[in-house]
Amino acid sequence: MADIRNHIEKRRTFAIISHPDAGKTTLTEKFLLYGGAIQSAGAVKGKSSDRHATSDWMEIEKKRGISVTSSVLQFEYEGYHINILDTPGHQDFSEDTYRTLMAADSAVMVIDGAKGIEPQTRKLFKVCAMRHIPIFTFINKMDRETRDPFDLIDELEKEFGIGTYPMNWPIGCGVDFKGVYERDRHSILAYDEFHAGRKRLKGIECDINDTEQMDSLIGPYAREALTEQIELLDGACFDFDIEKVRCGKLSPVFFGSALNNFGVEAFLERFLQMTSAPLSHMSIHPAVEPAEISPFEDHFSAFVFKIQANMNKAHRDRIAFMRICSGQFERGEEYFHVQAGKPVKLSQPQQMMAQEREIIETAYAGDIIGVFDPGIFSIGDTICAKGAKIQYAGIPTFAPEHFAVVEQIDSMKRKQFAKGMTQIAQEGAIQIFFEPNTGMERVIVGVVGVLQFDVLQFRMESEYGVKYYKKDTPHQLIRYIDNDPEELNPASLRLMQNTKWVQDVKGRNLLVFVGDYEIDFALDKNPGLKLSEFEQNM
Ligand code: G4P
């Protein structure tokens, strides 16, 4: 048992969130280099023809046009067993990106120092904040001209409503970038043109009030600016409080340059020290009182957070990704699929180990495994040891941002159309809605990323043999109506003409809006109307 505990305590499972181009891939790559999981920079993306993409699995999916995956990378570093959950951006952005965050214990937020907070960072931050997980900020590209660092942390605090604690402070930026001052260690990590991505960069101990020493290290101009800024920071900034960090109220901030491998190792080290072993998860099994399940619990338990369809088109196979929440997983063991009420053997359990996908024999709380899914799992399902009364609270449905009306062409294929739409929605690849009192021939499809529309069309044609008409609608926002329909009949609401009342598969009422103005209008004209972005039962 002590052995299992050791394994679990070493685990750190986190997601890296950022807006495209902020440097997420570059930072991930540097982490992997430290862990010895890859040998050369560039291996993650496989930019040049002679380099292998770490995630070749994703490449294959891309060729098939169904790249909606979030991959998991694992490596060992300084005695820690690290699981990095990738959150795809650009056109790959989808509901899976959000769901992945449900499997993480903490998040690293990468911000481009010249740009500050960008839209995708905002969206992903919201989900992390909803879970109260620790968020560590890495302000990247300090080797370029950036915005004023005070401005950047001010923006984080104001926009996100959290405190920040700069662990280090940049000394200049761009061509004048001299490195960072490590506030608690009273040392300088020096950046110079000969830095060339050195590993194991040693801090130079210094006394910020020792003018002579500081001048010899960074020159009088930078010294003056730094002492002034540190004084300001010490006076005005939040106190460091690890408890606040652990509940996501205070974000430790680090400045650096991922491309130049500057500040990355120091960041990784501090990050690993400050984060904790896998978190507990809430179980709401109907037969017992709701309880937090500790990762160190004897029984194995896990929940499905992502289902990847069509890994192999010929076999229509699916991979269910699950986050292990407690105990130890063992290949070949018979477990219990709570939602189906049936025993289950998890076949072909696999993990991504940097370059390879490999079948595994054991895994522990904190790990992510992918298992072959013959079509029995749904997002949010719990799998646990036989006899354990555990059922995890599920995964919220994230608000789609693109909508289209989809109507079947061939009425002879009504059944296939309904089946395909429902199954694909159950898997969580799309969300479907209905206008009240209309049938299943006309469905409103909502997606988080537009690529999901292509996936839908591809799968409906190839798997269900159904073609359909699709018309994009201008809607971008969706809100649950939290009022009881008995009290407030959605049909009686005063809404702008382009606001749509729809129902989801469970019959819950929602409103679809074109923009914020329409939401304000609805709230203004209908006193007592309660709208929420996330499902209230989560
Ligand atoms: P992403 O995964 O967040 O989308 O970003 P990615 O790491 O791919 O980085 C986006 C671009 O920013 C890349 O340049 C990358 O080299 C650059 N970059 C990342 N970190 C730093 C940094 O610390 N300093 C500077 N100056 N640049 C950085 P690119 O030209 O788009 O691609 P590439 O051809 O260099 O790969």
Image (spheres, rainbow, N blue to C red):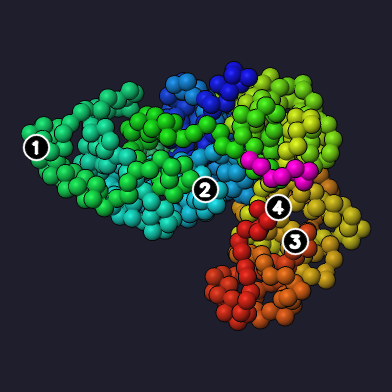
Tell whether circle 2 marks a residue whose Cβ is less than 8 angstroms from ligand 1.
no
Q: Do the numbered discs 1 and 2 sit on residues whose CB atoms are within 8 Å?
A: no
Residue under label 3, please give it. Answer: 504
Q: Residue at x 75, y 72 (%)?
A: 485
Quick one: label 4 or label 1, which is nearer the N terminus? 1
Q: Mark number for residue 68?
A: none
Q: Do the numbered discs 3 and 1 sit on residues whose CB atoms are within 8 Å?
A: no
Name the quadrant containing residue 144.
top left
Q: Residue at x 73, y 41 (%)?
A: 391
Residue under label 2, please give it. Answer: 132
As helix, strand or loop, the secondary structure at mark 3 comes to: strand
Quick one: label 2 or label 3, which is nearer the N terminus? 2
Name the quadrant containing residue 251.
top left
Q: Was residue 291 drawn as part of the magenta stretch in this picture?
A: yes
Of tags 1 and 2, the one toward the viewer is 2
As helix, strand or loop, the secondary structure at mark 2 comes to: loop
Of tags 4 and 1, the one toward the viewer is 1
